[in-house]
Image (cartoon, rainbow, N blue to C red):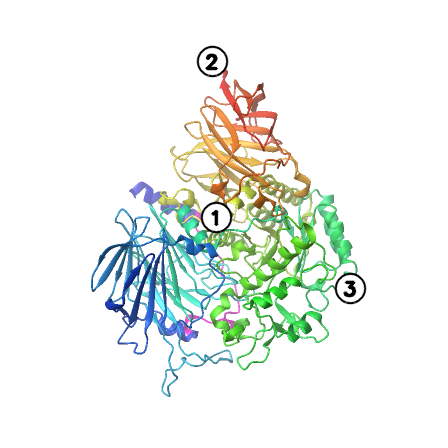
Amino acid sequence: MDLRSCALAMTVVLLLAAGHAVDAVKASDFKTCADSAFCTRLRNAPGPGFAIDPTSVSVSGAHVVAHLGSPAAPGATLILRLISMGGIVRLHINELDGTRFEVPGILVPSASASQQEWTIVSQSSSALQLRTSSGATASLNFSPVALSVTASDGTHVLTWNADGHFAFEHTRTKQENDPSGWWEETFNGHVDSKPRGPNAIGFDVLLHDTQHVFGLPERATQFSLAPTIDDNGTVSEPYRLYNLDVFEHLSNSPFGLYGSIPYLIGHRSGQTTGVFWLNAAEMYVDVVKSVAGTSTRWIAESGVLDLFLLLGPSPPEVARQYHVLTGGTAMPQLFSLGHHQCRWNYKDEADVAAVDAGFEEHALPYDVLWLDIEHTDGKRYFTWDKAYFPNPTAMQSDLASRGRKMVTIVDPHIKTDPNYRVFKEAEEKQLFVKTKDGADFKGHCWPGESAYLDMLNPTVRDWWADQFSTSVYEGSTTDLYIWNDMNEPSVFNGPEITMPKDARHVQGVEHRDLHNANGLFYHMATASGLRRRGYKEVDTVSGDRPFVLSRAFFSGTQRVGPIWTGDNAAEWAHLEVSIPMLLSLNVAGLPFSGADVGGFFGNPEPELLVRWYQVAAFYPFFRAHAHIETKRREPWLFGEETTGRIRSALQQRYRILPQLYTLFLHANATGAPIMRPLWWEFPGDALIYAVHNAFMLGDSQLVVPVLRQGANDTVVVLPGDGVWYDGTMGLQLDAAAPGRKLFRVATSLDAPVQTYLRGGSTLVLRERPRRSTRAMAKDPLTLVVALDRSGGASGDLYMDDGRSYAYQAGEFVYAQITMKGGVLEWGPGDHAQMGLPPPAPGYDPEVYVDRVVVLGLEGGPQDWSAVAVAGAVGPRVALDAAPGPVQVASEGPALALVVRRPHLPVRGTWSIEFRSERASS
């Protein structure tokens, strides 16, 4: 990087770096590394020097098998398996007897199909060198054991055990003089019996020449993970992955929160790499940066080493590789991408009706109204408090009559009441988690004393799924969907406000082994129940896609449903950190996520509330939520000026729904994130690697929100060196021009979030203001074409019924959009590439493109004509084309060529030929 670029990069950091306030949390409730015996033992400690027995090495197809041992760890015989999966290298190490717990159901069944045969490059008594089908070379050193991977061009990508931190605490018999913490430890008066003794695993992975690493959600901190250890020693706590109920979490801390994805992404110019450890036990990760790159040091309390090295080399390829392993994002119902209105709690049916009427009266679009725990009879889930909700089915039906849905909360703690049907039945069937002594485990949560279902057990999950039938869940309808909260699990009187690690699941599995996946199994079972309900009660052929929001999550949650970032606060720092939190989730494979708009705790002033709605309009999941002790904050309670600003933000959300829904298809088919860091689309632009206060929505739209109180301008960084267009006015900007890479733009509370359309892309919108997604189902589309310097652009659009699985039988439209040489073409896209079956010939959504906006025509939009051509050689029809504003209701300058009312079907093949009258004259 030259001096000018270095100076510019420093300016970007100074202008865009988050400046978080330090707020309070009850830190004494939660462990640090120093409080965890296994972390204390293994952090910064050298491994015992495991080595491969050269005589044990065998290579067969995609598999290498070898035995490991160490004189410093007598009695430990380990088995190593190295598996080639194309662009993925899997390293699996377990004890020889194979009895350690391995997390089931995380890898998709098709993952094993990606295995590809190793090619042996060389083999000796000290090393084995292999080549993958993608051309990468894996070098396995025997003593000490280490694995180095180089790209096909010979550049170093990563090295496992480069610093010699590999440790594997083997199963052993308890001895009288064993060290403290091996067989028992205590925290805040809670005793962990640790019957298996020390079982921890540690290792390091060096990402060569890489200074930026991302991922490891969930935590509220900067996007590019800061080092936790430097040349002078420990800088901070390691990044912890242990799902916990963290009440009023900090806005800037490495501390782990409600969910965990043990997946880290490294990026440098020319190389993006992923490191995924499939292990659901408590985990810590240190980040250590040096001139050689970034060393990541991983420690988990138990389980096995099941490590996947994703070799990229590009960001989309790393996403595809993680997708191969853990699957894609479930296609959501379209209503779930609209605006959700929630509060702890809407107090009764009259309150629900009044809130719904308020949205109608003030022309505020929304799709879902939520009920928190107070709607139940004494926190007994699947019940209603009849004093306040005497007619729940009528209430739901009334909302549904206007195209809206309801969501109720169903938490995992079951009130221990022998007269409560759910508890009684589960107790009789022995479905609860057990204590170490074999009794049903009981802890305290919202209902008081509660029992907890053993969701590791498939029989329990199957039983749970049956509870969501409308014939079982009394008062529910098929317009009711579900919210799973507190599923870390939260246990108010437990160690760290969660379940004891020595609690027992099916087949004697300790809770410590699966803790981080507990919420996922619960989430899966609930979604399975709604899916089952859909096929039985909504549509026996095509079903009804489930919608279940979860707080806890793990790798694979994307296949099930959305999550949110938990108990944030009405503070500017929490608004600001929401973006890096959501970017971390997106790059870690969980894009359907959002943060509570306005902050869960506290009372946002109107400016903060407006700014939050403005940025949340671009979150993949968009929900306003508030604590029971906060003031009411429905959008019309702050005066018409504020209501109008929030209305504009909500309408912006509904405008972009066609684009957003198409992005979910990409997430489903390829694992692509929806909110993307700038470097994802511009991987060679080193200036933007640390930027986390702006993001790309898909590949076409740069979003630059205002995150500072009282701001009258904001900083814009245009990535790459191409052309961009102001999303509101249509003004063309050249990122390569002086002063256009980094600049300030004036803003106000009345101005929408600053967006920029990428030259060479298309954007499909719905511009008619509506009250819900159902109301806009047949509305016409606007196609915006933003040309690059060569006059080209491309994009796509996906549509289906927005609710069922009929798309899996071909009932969808997937269109490819291109413009080149003055001709705009619309036709069928490559459905197979998107994981779709052949389209059904008879399916027609009866939706039309009725406005086409072209930006960047040579010489400006004046004196251009447009002719539509149906099919390849169909009739030619002159269209109404004239200069106009980008947005249909805008009074902005006429910087675009606008084609009005062409009435062109989304299901079809057509083109528009643009001709400059100046050129012809």
Residue 684 screen position, x and y as percent: 35, 43
In the image, is residue 69 above or below residue 797?
A: below
Does residue 346 show up? yes
Residue 440 versus residue 377: which sits nearer the camera? 440
- For the residues labelled 2 and 1, the Cα–Cα distance comes to 44 Å
Asked if residue 405 lies left or right of residue 527, the reply is: right
Residue 33 falls within the magenta-colored stretch: yes
Residue 576 screen position, x and y as percent: 51, 52
Q: Amino acid at mark 2?
A: Ser
Q: What residue is disc 1 on?
A: 673
Residue 546 screen position, x and y as percent: 62, 54
Question: Which callout, 3 or 1, points at the residue further toward the start of the chain?
Answer: 3
Question: Which callout, 3 or 2, points at the residue further toward the start of the chain?
Answer: 3
In the image, is residue 655 above or below residue 433?
A: above
Indicate the secondary structure of the residue bearing disc 2. Answer: helix
Q: Quadrant of residue 5?
A: top left
Asked if residue 828 lies left or right of residue 163, the reply is: right
Indicate the secondary structure of the residue bearing disc 3. Answer: loop
Q: Main secondary structure of the magenta part?
A: loop
Q: Quadrant of residue 363?
A: top right
- For the residues labelled 3 and 1, the Cα–Cα distance comes to 43 Å
Residues at discs 3 and 2 in contact (Cβ within 8 Å): no
Q: Amino acid at mark 3?
A: Lys
| Mark 3 closeness class: few <14, some 14–19, many ≥20 residues within 10 Å | few
Which region of the structure is painted magenta?
A: 16-34
Q: What residue is disc 3 on?
A: 386
Q: Residue at x 53, y 40 (%)?
A: 838
